[in-house]
Amino acid sequence: MAKADSAHQVEPTTDPHDYPELQRRFGGRYVARRGTQVIADAETYDALSDHLRREKFEAEDVVIEYVDPPDLVSAY
Amino acid sequence: MPIEFALSRKLTRFGLISDPRIPVTVLTVPRPQTFRFLLDTGADFSLAPRRLAEEAGLSWSSLDEVQVVGVERRGVTARLGQLPLRIGTTELSVRCVYVQGPGAPFILGRADFLDRFVLTIDTRRERILLDEIGGAPSSD
């Protein structure tokens, strides 16, 4: 029998190692990370995208996300 | 073959909870970019900021206008377009509601996305599994 994981395509983790800490520092903002390092953040996605384009940071290894504030409850 | 992701946790005012977000490549122009999207079984359609529509090569004025409501029921005006994605080795295009305004999250909803996969959120193993319906069966 094959090992369970051999049947899975496991995506390399792009999660921040400590998302709660990311929330404390960047909650309510859009961030771009390379690995666990935040390379840019902005209040809006437009501003972040403009910055990434200016600095030529657009690349697949840069992960962009909206960081939920730690003190709110989301009901999307 | 299922695609497996780490399941992270997020902080809320009332403590830590699971946070099923996955990295997905959006086929933006001129080069693809990676975004972390929330997997939301409560969302009819996927959702993203307006700028992403333009970065995906869509013309804002050509998109159909649509009202989007959340729990507050006030609604916001948005536009419906396609969102070209790559997840693992699978490329697909999903209908997406593009929202103008601050704080628009990145969400993958049921239409064209979750309807296409068996989703497992395994909090014990801290893993998310997406198994494409009709895809190659797993060997385990």
Image: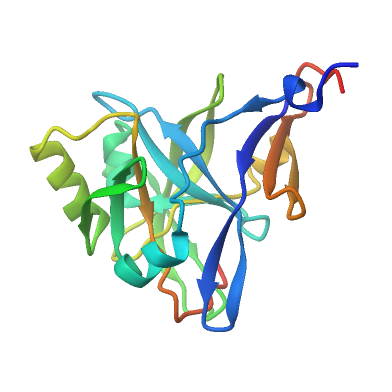
Q: Is residue B97 visible?
A: yes
Q: Residue furthest left?
A: A54
Q: Quadrant of residue A59?
A: top left
What residue is shown at x 10% (from left), y 38% (from top)?
A55
Please name whichever residue, A61 or B59, is drawn nearer the observer in this view of the structure: A61
Q: Quadrant of the N terminus of chain A?
A: top right
Q: Residue at x 42, y 58 (%)?
A: B105
Q: Is residue B63 left or right of residue A59?
A: right
Q: Is residue A28 visible?
A: no
Q: Indicate left or right for B34 with B107 as reference.
A: left
Work out whether B100 lies above or below B24.
Answer: below
Q: Provide residue B33's location: percent of width, then percent of height.
A: 34, 33
Instruction: Determine the residue positioned at 68% across, 50% down.
Output: B126
Name the quarter where the C terminus of chain A is drawn.
bottom right
Question: Measured along the vertical axis of the image, is residue A67 above or below residue A2?
Answer: below
Residue A63, image x and y in percent?
36, 41
Q: Is residue B26 left or right of residue B55?
A: right
Q: Position of residue B27 (x, y in %)?
A: 38, 27
Spot occupied by residue A2 in the image (x, y as percentages of width and height): 84, 17
Report which quarter residue B15 is drawn in: bottom right
Residue at 43% x, 32% y: name it.
Answer: B25
